[in-house]
Structures are given as structure tokens and as C-alpha cells.
Amino acid sequence: MPAPGSSDATQMETPEYGLLSEIARRYYIEGETQDGIARALDLSRMKVNRMIREAQEAGLVEIRVRFHSSQTRELERDLCDRFGLKHLLIAPGSQSPDQQRRNVAMTVTHFLESNLRENLIVAVGMGRNVAAVAENQASRTFQSLTFVSGSGGAAEAGSEGNADHICRNLARRFGGNAVTLYAPAYVPEADLRESLMRNATVRRTLNLARSADFALVGIGDLGPDSHMARMGWFSREELQKAQDAKVVGDLMGYDFFDAGGTPCNDALGGRVIGLTREDLQRISTTIAIASEPSKAMAILGALRTGTIDVLATSLSNCLAIQGMLGAGL
């Protein structure tokens, strides 16, 4: 909760927050429908829906979904033992891609609440799954955390998908400071990338990211809704060439690998400014996040890179990976 006298505390006393609390109480505690709340409070159903989301974003509502241990204990033990994971964070499934992403992100938020300490550094990648973590209101805050961008920015990602925006959101949620990497995420030529990587400002920020205690990164694939396809960084021909070379996924949006976890950067690598696989391997706890069911093979390849310490994904993805292992893939 905000300290008494703070601007946030004052905001919590406003009529708008009173209405948010009333709607949240009716919806989550009394079990009233949105239509019923709208009629009772003389509001439109659309406004009630919006205010339910605002109540979550303001920290008035905290949703925690936990599986009974018997559902996941054996699966967690199996995958952790196979791949040397410190933790496997398993989220319940959902037919809605957005809700699935939120479910997975919530497991990461809970993990960070339990494991972050003052003065630690967290390196942050780009993408929707990492951004979803920063949308959750943390129940525990700190004073001296540092969230540092692990990759440059891209206009194509939109502000929400860029690492610097995610860092600022995480700093607001958990407390602490955000550090931006002042460089583009993608450049078309390897020589230009090498030049920018030698820039003093870029080098200083990446060195800070390399010294991180935790890293938050996404796992990508090469599908039509993949990070690379949405960004438009690579042509259809380049993506096809990568698929022909047996590339199944990437870490951080650009460090590519095959199903065995072997690096495969010949077709697409060497053009993005950010942390490398080797950098992530030196960070004590790298948390990889993937919610989409299309990413099961990419997750399996990412696990085999030896880079990941904590995996956050859905129960269905975990079962799919276990099935692929059983089939000898």
C-alpha cells in the first residue's frame, strides 16, 4: 500500500476509487454479474467491464491462481530434472490467448515477489509475454531495484512491447529504477551492429545488464504471429530459409536455435543489439516466458540451450513437451 500522505494514498480516497472498490467487491466477492452491477449502479455494462480491469491495474484486486500440488508436482520434477531448471512455473490453461498470457505472467509476478531483494538488478527483454508481467500489480515493493533493458527499441513493437517501456512499468510495480538501452533493436547490417555495440553508452548499459541477478526473456518461434513476423525485421524468404535450416525458435527475439538447442544464427543472426545467449548463461537466474500453444517445440529447443533457469509457461505446453520427449523428439 502507498505510504500515508503520498499522492497514491490521496488518489485512493477519491470518489472514482470508491466506485472501483464497490464494483470490485460486488464482482469478485458477492459474485454479481457485470449486467447486474451496471443496473444497480446505473452504469453501462461497458463501463463496468472497464472499471473491473482498472481495479486490477490499480492494485485493488489481486488474483492468485494456484494448482493443487498433486496436479503438477510430478510434471515439474520431471522437466526440472531433465533440463536442470531451478523452477518450473506452470499456469492454468485458457482458450483466450490474452488470458493465457496473463495467467503465465501472474506466475512470474509471484516468483519475483518471493525472490527479489533490495539492490538487485533485473535485465529485461522485449515482447508481449514479458510485457504482461509488468502489467500485474505487485503485492510487495522495494526501494532500490534496477530494471535494465536487455535489448534496444523498435518502433514496430509499439511502446508497450519495447524493453525500456517494460522496465519502467516494472519499476513502477515493484519499486526502483529503470535504465534504457539507447539503441535500435534491429539494424540491417552486421557491420553497423558491431559499430553500435562498441558505442560507449550502449556498452555501458549492456554491461549493466550482463551483471544482472535476474533476466526476464521471451521465447519466440517462426510462426506467422511470431515476434519477427510482427516486427517485419526479416523477409518471408529469410524466415523460410531459417525454417529450412531447422530453426525452431529464439531467445530474446533474435538468438536462434534448432530443436536440439544448437545455435542457428547463420540465416537471421547478427543484426540485433542486445544480450546474447552467452550473456544470459552468465546471469544467475534467467526466467524464460512463453504462453502460446504454438511454442511447445520452441520451448523444448530453448530448454536444451542450457540458458534457462526458470521456465514460465502453460500446463498444456508442459504436457506437450513431455509428450514430445516421450516420442523421442
Image (cartoon, grey):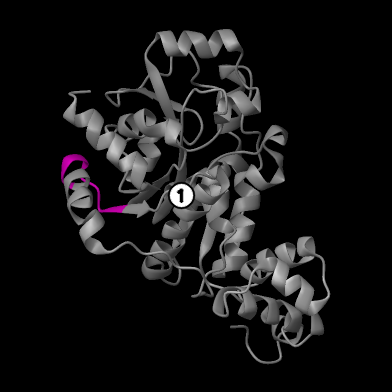
**Mark 1 crowd level (few <14, some 14–19, many ≥20, 10 Å Cα):** many
Magenta span: 81-88
Q: Is residue 171 above or below residue 223?
A: below
Residue nearer the viewer, 141 or 148: 141
Q: Is residue 3 left or right of residue 141?
A: right
**Residue 52, percent across and down?**
67, 68
Q: Is residue 214 above or below residue 243?
A: below
Q: Quadrant of residue 127?
A: top right
Residue 272 appears anywhere in the view: no
Residue behind mark 1: 216
Residue drawn at x 46%, y 49% as measured from the top left: 216
Residue drawn at x 21%, y 44% as measured from the top left: 79
Residue 231 appears anywhere in the view: yes
Q: Is residue 81 left or right of residue 238?
A: left
**Residue 107, percent across and down?**
42, 58
Q: Is residue 113 above or below residue 285?
A: below
**Residue 313, percent across and down?**
39, 46
Q: Is residue 249 magenta?
A: no
Residue nearer the viewer, 32 or 143: 32
Q: Quadrant of residue 84?
A: top left
Three-letter residue code for mark 1 = Leu
Query: Considering the numbered disc 1 on the image, is that residue within a helix, a strand or a loop?
Result: strand
Question: Split into 4 quadrants, where in the image is the C terminus?
Answer: top left
Q: Is residue 85 magenta?
A: yes
Residue drawn at x 38%, y 42% as measured from the top left: 280
